[in-house]
């Protein structure tokens, strides 16, 4: 790991983000092996297509809303592929590409945004917590799970995603501090996409980088080129490995950019200049890997087409929602009041259908 | 029979639960070697080690949020919010995550955890040390909210709360911490979700919970001298509300007063009155009345005697229930 500037010792993160592949697709550090590079590339191509497809589904009314991560695929994919099977992932609402990369079926990943249930997948089956909408509240959950695993003697690590805006929340502080004090095996991955809806990073933080925040908690902090999947993968792998072996938590900041709006329903023209995104389009994580590996997206076109066709077909089915389920998962056993309300709703629906 | 107070009964409940189930862990502020500001966790670190009972950084949201993650991993955390109003920074974790995790995940992730909140006034505390915050929690679907009014229940209900497959907000009436009772522990009382009739009577039902159960018992004694035979119900579980026990009593007496410490407006008593009115309207011989705190922020100690329900005020309210009609 000679190419990594930051170290587990509490040195300040470098001003220049850690980079292994530059904007031209040239290697500027020790790269992961070829097999890893290809899986990063593939997952980014599929992730980009997934982002595009999901946004299209909002236009067709099949998704209520979609917060795209176009431009951030290197963060989503690089950090997630660094996880081992026993590790856990705590994603936010924007991390659908990470969740899909972790192996959760696309349709199940999208149920929250589709509106037929909040979390469509079984968190235990994939070791992926539900997509978290409130900002940074998933941080303490990740710390708690990691701490519990350590108490049990299990050597797993937990990766938790948060955005630049989320670092302003109190729960981010509490999560960082608890993790450090408990020496919990957690890696906080901050995707700094530089915009919290319309508020730019300059109004979010005065820290030199968000990775600098780690120092105050007694953790190492890494400032990584978030459009370089190789750098993200390498740094997060190292941080997770150290966490698993009892070395404690760390913060990794991936410096990237949100190319698309916050969600399909906002308009970036109201708060930022079109020119703002231009340099970031040139620094596109996919382009960089196309150049590095000498293959373009078409290498995965057939697979991507098939997956998106499956997703469209699944999403075009009307979701089956059972009103009885409203009451089933509030408590382990529904209370008498909930049973009565369920019966009342059933009667209402029967009357509407004319069964009565 | 040993003489035990409520704090000791709670301590014994934690001790017994931790002995029986290695997944039970206790943490929060000052709960470790110090034993908690009310001594409820005294001796737990010494007996079970720092991995089972430990001090956390001072941060309520972090405490509750961390407990969520631990429960997701199969543990049964019991956390302490040192005082009622100190829990408010954790409100988002409690309402957005603790209450909803089972629902969000369609039953795939349960959170068997207990949040202990010493609540209420009457101890001469300063600002933020006397709130009754139960209505915030009972309004949140997914939470079970209970409060023991009796020392024997404190043991039994805390054991049941820890054993519950769902998260429990366990409200401890701090003015009752030092009330002693003859007890042989371990002993289980009625199921946690049931209300109990603490005293039988024919003329009027006093419905209460937590610290004011004792106030109502004193009131019932005084009312006897006035010729009023008062029934006292200890709700024990606020969410869910044991409607059957409450309604059976009101149908018998025809008159009822709900008594609690917290402000009356949008308070828990409103729920009881509304529920009983819907279910027992034709049995009621007078409107149901409420006795609670004034609709003011909880006052400083020199004024709290005016805020807290006391027997005279409850007797006056009973008198307003059209006794001349009898």
Image (cartoon, coloured by chain):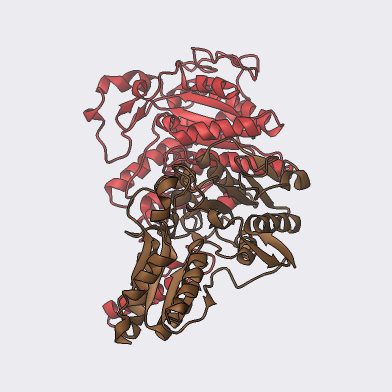
Chain colours: A red, B brown
**Residue shown at 66%/44% (left/top)?**
A148
**A35 sits left or right of A55 in the view:** right
Residue at horizontal 38 percent and vertical 49 percent from the top: A113
What count of labels does the image hold? 0
Q: Quadrant of residue A355?
A: bottom left
- The x and y percentages for residue A320 are 39, 64
Q: Nearer the viewer, residue A298 or B256?
A: B256
In the rendered view, would you say A272 is above or below A112? Answer: above
State which quarter of the image contains the N terminus of chain B.
bottom right
Q: Is residue A203 visible in this depiction of the protein?
A: yes
Residue visible at 59% across and 40% down in the picture: B29
Farthest left residue?
Answer: A270
Location of residue B226 (image quadrant): bottom left
- Whether residue B244 appears in this view of the structure is no
Where on the picture, by quarter, is residue B187? bottom right
- In depth, the one of B325 and B34 nearer the eye is B325
Residue sitting nearer the eye, A210 or B88: B88
Depth check, front residue: A168 or A350: A168
Query: Residue A283: percent from the left, percent from the top?
Result: 41, 20
Q: Position of residue A171 (x, y in %)?
A: 48, 36
In what quadrant of the picture does the C terminus of chain B appear?
Answer: bottom left
Where's residue B230, x and y in %?
A: 45, 78
On screen, residue A203 above or below A59: above
Looking at the image, the residue that sits furthest to the bottom is B326
Q: Residue furthest right?
A: B47
Q: Is residue A216 above or below residue B163?
A: above
């Amino acid at each position: 790991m000679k190419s990594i500037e930051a170290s587990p010792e509490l040195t300040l993160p470098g001003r220049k983000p850690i980079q292994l592949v530059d904007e031209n697709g040239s290697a500027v550090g020790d790269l992961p092996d070829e097999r890893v590079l290809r899986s990063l590339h593939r997952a980014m191509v599929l992730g980009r297509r997934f982002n595009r497809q999901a946004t299209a589904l909002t236009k067709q009314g099949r998704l209520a809303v979609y917060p795209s991560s176009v431009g951030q695929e290197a963060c989503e994919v690089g950090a997630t592929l660094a996880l081992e099977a026993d590790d856990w992932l705590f994603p936010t609402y924007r991390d659908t590409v990470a969740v899909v990369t972790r192996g959760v079926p696309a349709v199940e990943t999208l149920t929250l945004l589709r509106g037929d249930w909040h979390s469509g997948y079984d968190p235990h089956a994939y070791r992926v917590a539900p997509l978290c909408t409130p900002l940074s509240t998933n941080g303490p959950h990740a710390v708690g799970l990691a701490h519990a695993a350590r108490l049990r003697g299990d050597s797993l690590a937990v990766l938790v995603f948060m955005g630049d805006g989320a670092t302003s929340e109190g729960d981010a502080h509490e999560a960082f501090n608890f993790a450090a004090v408990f020496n919990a095996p957690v890696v906080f991955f901050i995707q700094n996409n530089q915009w919290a809806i319309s508020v730019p990073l300059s109004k979010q933080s005065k820290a030199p980088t968000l990775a600098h925040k780690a120092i105050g908690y007694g953790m190492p902090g890494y400032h990584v080129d978030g459009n370089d999947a190789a750098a993200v993968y390498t740094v997060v792998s190292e941080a997770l490995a150290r966490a698993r072996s009892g070395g404690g938590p760390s913060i990794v900041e991936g410096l990237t950019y949100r190319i698309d709006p916050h969600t399909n329903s906002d308009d970036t023209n109201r708060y930022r200049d079109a020119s703002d995104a231009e340099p970031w389009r040139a620094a596109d994580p996919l382009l960089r890997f196309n150049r590095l590996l000498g293959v373009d997206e078409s290498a995965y076109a057939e697979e991507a087409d098939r997956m998106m066709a499956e997703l469209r077909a699944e999403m075009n089915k009307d979701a089956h929602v059972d009103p009885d389920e409203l009451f089933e998962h509030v408590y382990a056993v529904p209370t008498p009041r909930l049973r009565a309300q369920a019966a009342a709703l059933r009667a209402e629906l029967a009357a509407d259908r004319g069964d009565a | 029979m040993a003489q035990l107070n409520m704090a000791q009964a709670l301590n014994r409940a934690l001790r017994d639960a931790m002995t029986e189930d290695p997944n039970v862990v206790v943490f929060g502020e000052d709960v470790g070697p110090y034993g908690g500001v009310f001594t409820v966790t005294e001796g737990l670190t010494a007996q079970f080690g720092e991995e089972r009972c430990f001090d956390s950084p001072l941060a309520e949201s972090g405490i509750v949020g961390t407990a969520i993650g631990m429960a997701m991993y199969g543990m049964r955390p019991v956390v302490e919010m040192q005082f009622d109003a100190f829990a408010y920074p954790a409100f988002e974790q409690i309402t957005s995550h603790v209450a909803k995790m089972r629902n969000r995940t369609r039953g795939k992730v349960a959170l068997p955890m207990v949040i202990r909140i010493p609540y209420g006034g009457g101890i001469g505390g300063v600002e933020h040390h006397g709130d009754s915050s139960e209505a915030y929690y009972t309004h949140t679907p997914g939470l079970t909210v209970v409060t023991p009014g009796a020392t024997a229940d404190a043991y039994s209900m805390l054991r049941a709360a820890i054993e519950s497959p769902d998260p429990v907000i366990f409200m401890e009436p701090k003015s009752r911490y030092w009330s002693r009772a003859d007890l042989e522990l371990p002993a289980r009382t009625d199921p946690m979700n049931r209300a109990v009739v603490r005293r039988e009577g024919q003329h009027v039902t006093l419905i209460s919970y937590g610290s004011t159960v004792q106030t109502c018992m004193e009131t019932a004694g005084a009312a006897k001298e006035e010729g009023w035979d008062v029934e006292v119900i200890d709700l024990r579980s606020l969410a869910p509300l044991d409607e059957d026990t409450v309604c059976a009593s009101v149908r018998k007496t025809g008159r009822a007063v709900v008594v609690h410490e917290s402000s009356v407006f949008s308070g828990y008593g409103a729920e009881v009155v509304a529920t009983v009115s819907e279910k027992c309207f034709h049995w009621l011989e007078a409107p149901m009345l409420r006795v609670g705190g004034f609709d003011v922020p909880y006052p400083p100690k020199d004024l709290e005697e005016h805020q807290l329900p006391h027997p005279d005020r409850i007797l006056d309210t009973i008198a307003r229930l059209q006794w001349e009609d009898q």
